[in-house]
Image (cartoon, rainbow, N blue to C red):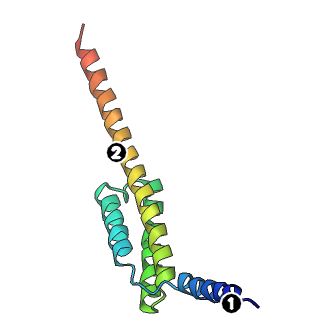
Amino acid sequence: MRASTLIGMIASAVLSTACATTSQFPDRQLAESRASVRVAEALGATADPHAATYLEIARGQMKDADRAIALRDYWLAERSLRSAQANAELAAALAREANARAEAVDMQRQVQALRARVP
């Protein structure tokens, strides 16, 4: 076996092992996921049934991440945190939509009330 082939195989083995284990604490992802959950809560995601569903999923994934962090499985924790962030962002978007819909209904009522006043 040629030396360059052997070096290539060793380098591949080292790199694949390094990529397979993420041993860094996912502090940035943890902060971003928590912030996404707080935003969804602040927008009233608990008041809309669809948004509340995704918010609860996100909260569950945050708990899964906490358990993975406790076990020092940072790769799994980061995956759970990314999923939690996505679900929290969806909950926030649904809450925004529900709020906009409620405002539109309120505006329609105001328009109808004004039309009723005009002879």
Q: Which residue is mark 1?
A: 3
Establish if 15 lies above or below 30: below
The mark nearer the N terminus, 2 or 1, is: 1
Quarter of the view holding residue 110: top left
Nearest the eye: 20 or 105? 20
For the point 68% across and 90% down, which residue is it? 3
Going by the numbered disc 1, the residue's amino acid type is: Ala
Instruction: Write the residue at 23% across / 11% down.
Output: 118
Residue 22 shows up from this direction: yes
In the foreground, 62 or 8: 8
Element at label 1: helix
- Numbered mark located on residue 99 in the image: 2
Is residue 55 among the parts visible in the rendering?
no
Q: Position of residue 78 (x, y in %)?
A: 46, 76
Quarter of the picture holding the N terminus: bottom right
Q: Amino acid at mark 2?
A: Asn
Query: Marks 2 and 1, Cα distance to the nearest angstrom?
Result: 66 Å
- Which residue ends up furthest to the right in the rendered image? 1
Residue 20 position in % (x across, y down)? 57, 83
Tag of residue 44: none
- Name which residue lies at 49% across and 83% down: 22
Q: Secondary structure at mark 2?
A: helix
Q: Residues within 10 Å of mark 1 (few under 14, many from 20)?
A: few
Is residue 64 rendered to the left or right of residue 40? right
Where does residue 108 sit, x and y in percent of width and height? 33, 27
Query: Relative to 16, is 53 on the left or the right?
Result: left
